[in-house]
Amino acid sequence: MDDKNQLEARLNAPVILDRSHHPISRRDIDYDALKVLYRLSNHGFIAYLVGGAVRDLLLGRRPADFDVGTDAHPNQIKKLFRNAFLIGRRFRLAHIRFQGGKIIEVSTFRRKPDEEELRAEREEERRAAAEERAREDAGEAPAGPSFISSAASPSEPQAEPDEAPAPDDRLVPGVFVEEREAVPPAQAAPASPAAEQNPIPIPGRPPLKPIAFGTPQEDAFRRDITINALFYDIATYSIIDYVGGLDDLRRGRIRIIGDPAESYTEDPVRIWRVVRHASRLGFTIEEETERAIPSHRHLLGTSAGSRLYEELGKDMKSGHSRAFFELARRHALLPIVLGEIGDLYHRSDEAFARLAEGLAAVDAAVARGEAPAPEIAFSLLLWPWAKTVLAGVQGDKPKLLFEAYRQTKPAAQIPKGIILNAVHTLAIVESMLEALSTGRMRWALKKRIHYAGASRICAFLVQGTLGEGEDPFGRIFDSRFGPGRTPETRRRRRRRPRRKPAHGPAAADPAK
C-alpha cells in the first residue's frame, strides 16, 4: 500500500473505545434490545446499538429508545424474528414488537442518498402531507403505519421466547439457545435482490429508485449530528466513532456531520434537531453549524407539515419544551414553524414570557411522570395568542378561534382534532377567568367534555401550577365566593292561567 492509501486509511479509520475505556454496561441496555442484538450477532450479522441510545448512555442518561443498526436486509430480519413487522415504502424498517407495546426499531445500514433519491423522498413527503390534509378535511381518522408486512396481526404482538443474556459484562457471545434453525446470512438472502431493495410500488404513482444499502461507516456519515452517529458493538462491547462524536461529547457541543449548508439544504429539519439537542443537553452549537442557520432556516417552511408536527410533538412532551422554545426563538424559527402565532412569540417579550411559563408547567408535569394530555399541552402553547383573539369577542368563540388559527398559516400541520380540542378548552378557560372577576359562572359548562382540561389550565393561570384533583377551578371559585355554588337546574317558568269570562261566553262580547 502506497503512502497516499495509507494516509486515506488512517483518516477513514474510526476511533474505537474498548470496554475498559467507556462506561456503557449491558446492564444499562434494554432487556429486549439485547435479545435483538444477540440474535443478529449470533447469525453472523453486524449488530450495533445506534443513535441517541449510545449518546445518552455515555452521558449517564436513560435512553427513551433503543434502536439497532445491522447489515442484515429487511427480509433477513423478518426471517429471524417472527414478531417483526416491516414498515415504510422507500426504506423499509423492521419494528420488532414485544409485550407492553414496546418496539425495537432495526434498520439496515444505508449510504447517504444522492440527489435523485432526495428529490424522490421530498416528493413522497409532499404527497403524504397532501393526502393527510385531504383526510383531515374529509373528517377521516389519521392513517396508521402503512405497508406492514407480516402474516400475524400487528395488533397482537408476541414476545420472543428466548432467554435473555445474563446482566454481566463477562458474558460471551452465543449464549442464546435458538428454538429455530440458524439462518446464515448467505442462506437468508431473498431469492430476488430486486424484491429486497425496490420500494413497494403503489398503483398510479411513478416508481422510485431502489434504496442503496451501505456500510456502517457510510451509515454514520448519512446521519445528522456527530453525537447521534456513535455505535455500540455487541460483539466486542466497544464504542465505534467515525465522525468525531466522542470528542464533541467531551466538549459539550452540537456539530453537523459534513458541510452544514449542504446538510440543511438536504434536510432542513436538521436545523430543528440541532436546536433540540443543544437545548436538551445544555450544549453549545459549533460555530459553522450555527452560522449556517440564518441563511437556511426559511427552508423549514418547505418541509412536510406532518413531519414538523411530529418534531414539535416530541419537544412538547420531552420535559425540555421551555428550553427548546427559548433557543428556537433566539434563532428565529418560531415564525416559520408556527406562522403568525410564532411571529407574535418572536416579537413580543410579554407574550413569550406567558408562553414560557406555560411550557415550564408542562415540563414540571412531565418530570413528575404526569405528562398532560395533548389538548392541555397545545392549549398552553396557544393561550398567549388566543388570549388576544378572544378579548372582546362575542358569539361562537370556539368557531371564531379555530378560524383565526387557520388564518395564521403555520408550517407545522397540527392535527385538526387537537386544534379543535384546544380551542374549545380555551374558550372555557376564558369564561372561567371572567367568572373569577365577576363572581358569575355559567355552570352549564361543567357538562362539557373539555371542562376538566380547562379547569387545570385556569388553575395554572391563577396559581402558577397545573391544578390537581377533579375540579381545581371549582375549588378556586369557592374559595373566593363561598362554597355551595353548584350547577343550578333551571326552573320551569310557570305560565299564568287564562282569565275566564265573568258571566259566561256572552259576557266576552260587549256588543251583544
Image (spheres, helix red, strand yellow):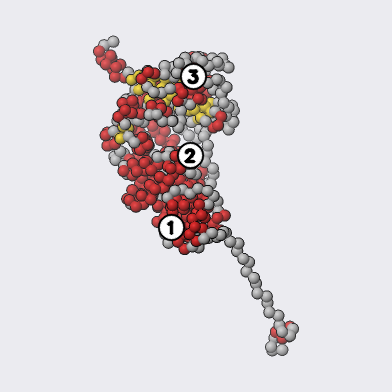
Q: Residue 480 location in percent, x, y?
A: 48, 59
For the residues labelled 1 and 3, the Cα–Cα distance comes to 58 Å
Counting other residues with Cα less than 10 Å from the Cα at mark 3, is it few (<14), some (14-19), or many (20 or more)? many
Tell me what residue is drawn at x 36 percent, y 31 percent.
224
Judge from the rendering whether residue 37 lies leftward or rightward of residue 497; answer left or right.
left
Q: Which marked residue is nearer to the observer: mark 3 or mark 2?
A: 2
Tell me what residue is drawn at x 34 percent, y 36 percent.
282
Q: Which marked residue is nearer to the observer: mark 1 or mark 3?
A: 3
Q: Earlier in the sequence, mark 2 or mark 1?
A: 2
For the residues labelled 3 and 2, the Cα–Cα distance comes to 32 Å
Q: Which residue is mark 2?
A: 369
Counting other residues with Cα less than 10 Å from the Cα at mark 2, is it few (<14), some (14-19), or many (20 or more)? few
Which label sits on residue 390? 1
Q: Residue 418 location in percent, x, y?
A: 49, 46
Picture quarter with the C terminus: bottom right
Q: Are marks 3 and 2 in contact (CB under 8 Å)?
A: no
Picture quarter with the N terminus: top left
Q: Which residue is mark 3?
A: 38
For the residue labelled by badge 3, is the local secondary structure a helix, a strand or a loop?
Answer: helix
Q: Which marked residue is nearer to the observer: mark 2 or mark 1?
A: 2
Judge from the rendering whether residue 54 lies leftward or rightward of residue 347; answer left or right.
right
Q: Earlier in the sequence, mark 3 or mark 2?
A: 3
Report the amino acid beneath label 1: Leu
How many marks overall?
Answer: 3
Q: Residue 271 location in percent, x, y?
A: 34, 37
